[in-house]
Image (cartoon, grey):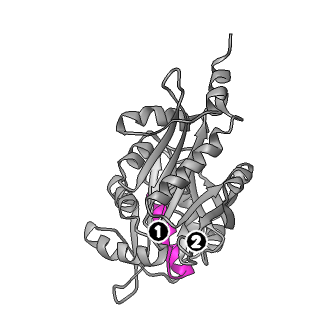
């Protein structure tokens, strides 16, 4: 009797059926992503599905009807992103991952994206190169372990004070200007993603302003089970980056449980590496920001010091 994966392998030679996921599929998608050990939360997947820019494309087992592979596509206009390429372990080495990538590229191209980007871990680089992606820049992941809020607070108190801009909590009325700046610097419209971060984690949305009140930077963050992620950060200077990160870390000290702080940034950032060194962050891993199609400067501005999300821009 043929095993299930043998039957699937034979079906692969004929045709893969791709299905766009709906909100009813949140649990199934989360279960697949949870196999990877990534720190995506159930709410992250739910919000990704609610975002009108996003689509999860899935491959379904022809016998059981269960999802066996997924990929996330993010349409930001001329620029698209691909992330969360995951195939269940028992169905790997059958070419499903490559077919998922091809379907994602085709989907985004039909949606009008002329440039498609992604962050590839070193082991997956060859998969993406086979589809036609090229390396653009290095993409780093840094982490700061925090034994306790008291230790973090004491560490921050010992750091030298620097001249810095005015830092304030972001308000909903600030969003039109923030989005205008973000579209110019990031190079695409990610309004639903940023507004969701603000709605879900308002205590970790900060603005930096100069003495005239001009916005010179901002930072969004998210927290879950003692982990703070610094996300979607833009600034005009080293002092602004340090001030925004300091404010986020000070706010994190107020949480009942703290374990670590994470940030991702591209090597093109003018301020991120030095700022992370200032606070004691260390490199955890690195990926490759890759692109397919037209060469675009979108997402690589030196003013960007924190990636919004490696899978979503």
216 or 287: nearer the eye?
287
* Figure quadrant of residue 26: top left
User: Dot 2: what SS?
Assistant: loop
Classed neighbour count for the residue bearing mark 2: other residues with Cα under 10 Å, few (<14), some (14–19), many (≥20) = few
Q: CA distance from mark 1 to mark 2?
A: 10 Å
Residue 65 tag number: none
Q: Main secondary structure of the magenta part?
A: helix
> To which residue does mark 1 refer?
78
Residue 294 tag number: 2
Image point (37%, 52%), residue name: 51
How many numbered marks, from 0 up? 2
- Can residue 150 be seen in this snapshot? no
Percent position of residue 305, x then y: 55, 71
Percent position of residue 190, x then y: 41, 64
Image point (51%, 21%), residue name: 64
* Figure quadrant of residue 37: top right
Q: Is residue 28 magenta?
A: no
- Can residue 77 be seen in this snapshot? yes
Q: Is residue 247 magenta?
A: yes
User: Dot 1: what SS?
Assistant: loop
Image point (50%, 46%), residue name: 226
Q: Which quadrant does the N terminus fall into?
A: top right
Which segment did they paint magenta?
Answer: 230-253
């Amino acid at each position: 009797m043929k095993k299930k994966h043998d039957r699937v392998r034979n079906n692969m030679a004929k045709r893969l059926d791709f299905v766009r996921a709906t909100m009813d599929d949140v649990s199934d998608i989360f279960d697949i992503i949870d196999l990877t050990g990534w720190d995506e939360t159930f709410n992250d997947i739910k919000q990704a599905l609610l975002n009108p820019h996003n689509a999860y494309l899935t491959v379904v087992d022809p016998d059981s009807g269960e999802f066996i592979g997924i990929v996330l596509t993010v349409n930001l206009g001329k620029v698209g992103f691909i992330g969360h390429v995951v195939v269940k372990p028992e169905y790997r080495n059958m070419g499903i991952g490559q077919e998922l990538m091809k379907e994602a590229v085709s989907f985004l191209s039909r949606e009008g994206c002329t440039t498609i980007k992604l962050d590839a871990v070193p082991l997956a680089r060859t998969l993406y190169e086979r589809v036609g992606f090229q390396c653009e820049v290095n993409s780093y992941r840094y982490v700061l372990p925090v034994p306790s809020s008291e230790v973090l607070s004491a560490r921050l108190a010992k750091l030298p004070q620097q001249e810095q801009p005015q830092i304030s909590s972001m308000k909903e009325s600030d969003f039109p200007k923030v989005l205008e700046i973000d579209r110019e610097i990031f190079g695409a419209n990610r309004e639903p993603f940023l507004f969701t971060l603000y709605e879900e984690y308002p205590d970790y949305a900060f603005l930096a302003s100069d003495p005239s009140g001009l916005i010179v930077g901002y930072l969004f963050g998210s927290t879950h089970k003692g982990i703070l992620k610094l996300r979607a950060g833009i600034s005009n200077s080293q002092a602004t980056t340090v001030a925004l990160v300091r404010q986020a870390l000070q706010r994190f000290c107020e949480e009942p449980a703290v374990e670590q702080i994470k940030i991702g940034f591209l090597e093109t950032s003018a301020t991120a590496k030095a700022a992370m060194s200032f606070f004691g962050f260390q490199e955890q891993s690195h990926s490759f920001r890759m692109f397919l199609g037209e060469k675009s400067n979108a997402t690589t501005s030196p003013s960007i010091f924190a990636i919004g999300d490696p899978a979503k821009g």
